[in-house]
Image: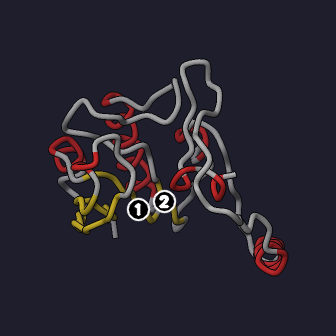
Amino acid sequence: MNKSCFNGLYRVNSKNEFNVPFNQKKKVNTYDKENIVAINQYFNNNQITILNGDFEYSVKDAKKRDFIYFDPPYDSDSDTFTSYTDNGFNKEDQVRLSKLFKKLDKKGCYVMLSNHNTKLINKLYKDYNIYVIEAKRNINANGSGRGKIEEVIITNY
């Protein structure tokens, strides 16, 4: 579905209904059999678990030496768009995630997280490795907001 949407975007409206316009491509390759078979074989031949749910629940059984990567809705230093669903992900959720990050670190898990390079994120993860990277963004309601932005990769290792 993403491949046929404007800039590969996914979002829903206040009624939780998908609401992204089609892109301008005349042809969209939505099915790559070779790739799907390869991914299927990889998942079947490795111990991989993919979960969909609240992040705390998703890692409740994490144990020492597990690798966990969090890619939450990104924080913002402004009141700009920060949510793809009506449920949102607010500052309190960012704090709750940082507490879980610390708990997993103490448990001996390898934890990685990506986010915007904001004051709050730097404060929450100040005791960890913070790598500032440059990322390019093509989606923004305001054209001047598109382009290069700073993101962070945070690790406990």
- Pinpoint residue 80: horizontal percent, then vertical percent: 28, 34
Residue assigned mark 2: 69
Alpha carbon separation for disc pair 1 and 2: 5 Å
- Pinpoint residue 34: horizontal percent, then vertical percent: 82, 81
Residue assigned mark 1: 112
Residue shown at the point (33%, 52%) measured from the top left: 115
- Pinpoint residue 102: horizontal percent, then vertical percent: 35, 49
Residue shown at the point (33%, 28%) measured from the top left: 92
Determine whether 121 is above or below 157 in the image: above
Mark 1 and mark 2 lie on one chain; the one further toward the N terminus is: 2
Front one among 8 and 110: 8
Q: Amino acid at mark 1?
A: Met
Q: Amino acid at mark 2?
A: Tyr
Front one among 25 and 144: 25
Residue shown at the point (25%, 68%) measured from the top left: 134
Q: Is residue 156 left or right of residue 44?
A: left
Assign a secondary structure to mark 2. Answer: strand
**Crowding at mark 2 (Cα within 10 Å: few <14, some 14-19, many 20+):** few
**Crowding at mark 1 (Cα within 10 Å: few <14, some 14-19, many 20+):** some
Image quadrant where one finds the C terminus: bottom left
Front one among 140 and 152: 140
Determine whether 25 is above or below 20 in the image: below
Residue shown at the point (23%, 63%) measured from the top left: 130
Query: Image quadrant of residue 136?
Result: bottom left
Query: Image quadrant of residue 31?
Result: bottom right
Determine whether 109 is above or below 46 in the image: above
- Pinpoint residue 117: horizontal percent, then vertical percent: 22, 53
Q: Is residue 91 left or right of residue 38?
A: left
Verify CB contact (< 8 Å) between mark 1 and mark 2.
yes
